[in-house]
């Protein structure tokens, strides 16, 4: 007799179904696991044996073979422990085979039989729902998986509770979804003294999901402005929250099963490796650009990142996804993020201040910002000079709109974009639009078209820059509530791409 149950193997954010088959046959006593299993999966036999011993269940003196099908798909992770134990208990006629065969299980076993939390229960729940199976996982992961309404999720604290559930002695309760984490923003945009132009650029970037580069001397407020960006971004839609949470589930970042409606804000250090930023490493895990999906990736000290790391951003910025290619796997992750970068104008940072600049001006600035290649620089929708704040401005009372007021305008502009793009799947903001759709929604009036033509010729804009100006102009018009893109919108959009802007 061959007993069966199901689990999943992760490929990017997708959970591929895996059939766990167990055969107990006559022969020399052994316990083998086949099906392209990695070291953690192969070690499951020792954890399962110890867990059964802790429950006073004797291992049979027979040949035990566990096959993970399809056998040519790589299997990684400790979450295979629970399904292997279920298949074995079913093969020993301890658990009913029909109920076990209708279950997708994942969980790591301790030597005493308790279940340890694992990553990826949210995408696993989606797979279980698609197969019309129930999901069995550790109790601490149940709240996360229960967010999938179509899946029936059971959470257990130990293998003993699993046995009692399937034998009808003490059925498990259906898991309830975790609480939605409330966003709390203590940093208000109104706290930033001066820098009105920078605040305006930040609002435009947030409203259209545009990439923003800020260049200014140390202490001018670049990081301070970026830290206030989460407070003006609109909340995630339910669809976006599910997409983002699936990635964070694979990275083990969901706390207590709660799903946040707040957009991610990732701030990697400039010493981060390519695998940390783009994704990769053992198991081809998601990188910072994927963890920032539907949110913001803030890269401070932008030129200090390794050149190879910066250049790998070019393709994901355009496509909205990244393929982590390895010898044994090609994993695709979504990464539709908003890139906000900050940089000093030169190595010393004071190129624009004659009293503090070094003797290499202006060559130090050319060398330093020259680390950012032209093609990457061209992908920033808004490029902004952030001048130092005068000491007299620091003593002035807070002025300008609060983050709440700016957030209201940003949310209204995003809603206009969503309504306009409702018939175009995959398009949610002006930054996503291209081709005929961009021509349809952002064609300026005659005066605006003439201004854009003159600017394109004078500043020698590339085709990419030309289209990015149109997208930014469309966002500026949305913030004003204007249906038509006019000359003033084009003029402001162009001003953010001019040298020295």
Image (cartoon, helix red, strand yellow):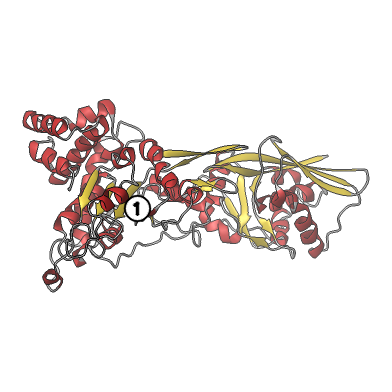
Closest to the observer, 277 or 488: 277
Q: Quadrant of residue 449?
A: top left
- Report x, y in % for residue 46: 78, 56
Left or right of 487: which side holds 284? right
On the question of residue 125 being in view, the answer is yes
The residue positioned farthest toward the front in the image shown = 359
The residue positioned farthest toward the top in the image shown = 436
Q: Is residue 25 above or below residue 349?
A: above
- Report x, y in % for residue 144: 51, 55
Q: Is residue 276 above or below residue 161?
A: above
What crowding class fits label 1: few (fewer than 14 Cα within 10 Å), some (14-19), or many (20 or more)? many
Closest to the observer, 211 or 356: 356
Number of marks present in the image shown: 1
- Report x, y in % for residue 135: 60, 49
Left or right of 84: which side holds 440? left
In percent of the image, x 60 and y 56: which residue is there? Answer: 118
In percent of the image, x 30 and y 42: which residue is there? Answer: 377
Q: Quadrant of residue 474?
A: top left
Left or right of 229: which side holds 456? left
Where the N terminus falls, by quadrant?
top right
The residue positioned farthest toward the left in the image shown = 447
- Report x, y in % for residue 146: 52, 53
On the question of residue 146 being in view, the answer is no
Closest to the observer, 38 or 10: 38
In percent of the image, x 56 and y 57: which residue is there? Answer: 142
Q: Is residue 499 above or below residue 60?
A: above
Residue bearing the label numbered 1: 302
Callout 1: helix, strand or loop?
helix
């Amino acid at each position: 007799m061959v007993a069966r149950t199901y689990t999943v193997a992760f490929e990017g954010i997708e959970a591929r179904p895996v059939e766990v088959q167990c055969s107990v046959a006559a022969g020399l006593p052994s316990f083998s696991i086949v099906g392209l299993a990695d070291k953690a999966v192969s070690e499951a036999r020792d954890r399962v044996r110890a867990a059964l011993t802790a429950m006073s269940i004797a291992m049979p003196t027979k040949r035990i073979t566990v096959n993970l099908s399809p056998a040519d798909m790589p299997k990684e992770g400790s979450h295979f422990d629970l399904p292997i134990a279920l298949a074995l208990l079913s093969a020993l006629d301890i658990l009913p085979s029909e109920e076990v065969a209708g279950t997708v299980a994942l969980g790591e076993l301790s030597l005493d039989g308790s279940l340890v939390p694992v990553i990826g229960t949210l995408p696993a729940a989606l797979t279980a729902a698609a197969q019309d199976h129930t999901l069995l996982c550790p109790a601490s992961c149940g709240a996360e998986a229960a967010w999938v309404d179509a899946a029936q999720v059971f959470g257990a604290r130990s293998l003993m509770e699993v046995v009692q559930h399937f034998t009808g002695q003490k059925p498990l309760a259906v898991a309830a979804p975790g609480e939605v984490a409330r966003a709390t923003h203590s940093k208000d945009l109104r706290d930033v003294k001066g820098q009105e132009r920078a605040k305006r650029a930040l609002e435009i970037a947030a409203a259209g999901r545009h990439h923003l580069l800020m260049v200014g001397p140390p202490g001018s407020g670049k990081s301070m402005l970026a830290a206030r960006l989460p407070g003006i971004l609109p909340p995630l839609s339910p669809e976006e929250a599910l997409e983002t949470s699936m990635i964070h589930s694979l990275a083990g970042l969901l706390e207590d099963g709660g799903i946040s409606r707040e957009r991610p804000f990732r701030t990697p250090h400039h010493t981060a490796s390519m695998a940390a930023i783009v994704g990769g490493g053992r198991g081809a895990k998601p990188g910072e650009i994927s963890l920032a999906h539907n949110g913001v990736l803030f890269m401070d000290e932008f030129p200090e990142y390794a050149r190879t790391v910066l250049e790998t951003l070019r393709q994901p910025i355009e496509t909205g996804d990244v393929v982590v290619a390895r010898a044994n796997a090609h994993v695709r992750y979504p990464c539709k993020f908003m890139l906000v970068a900050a940089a000093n104008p030169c190595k010393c940072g004071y190129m624009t201040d004659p009293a503090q600049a070094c003797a290499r001006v202006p060559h130090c600035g050319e060398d330093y910002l020259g680390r950012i290649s032209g093609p990457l620089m061209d992908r920033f929708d808004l490029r902004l000079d952030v001048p130092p704040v005068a000491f007299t401005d620091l003593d002035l009372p807070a002025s300008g709109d609060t983050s709440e007021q700016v957030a209201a305008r940003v949310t209204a502009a995003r809603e206009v974009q969503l309504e306009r793009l409702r018939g175009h799947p995959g398009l949610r903001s002006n930054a996503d639009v291209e081709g005929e759709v961009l021509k349809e929604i952002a064609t300026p009036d005659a005066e605006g078209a003439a201004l854009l033509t003159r600017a394109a010729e004078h500043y020698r804009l590339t085709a990419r820059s030309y289209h990015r100006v149109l997208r930014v102009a469309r966002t500026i018009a949305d913030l004003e509530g204007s249906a038509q893109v006019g000359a003033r919108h084009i003029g402001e959009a162009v001003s953010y791409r001019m040298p020295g802007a």
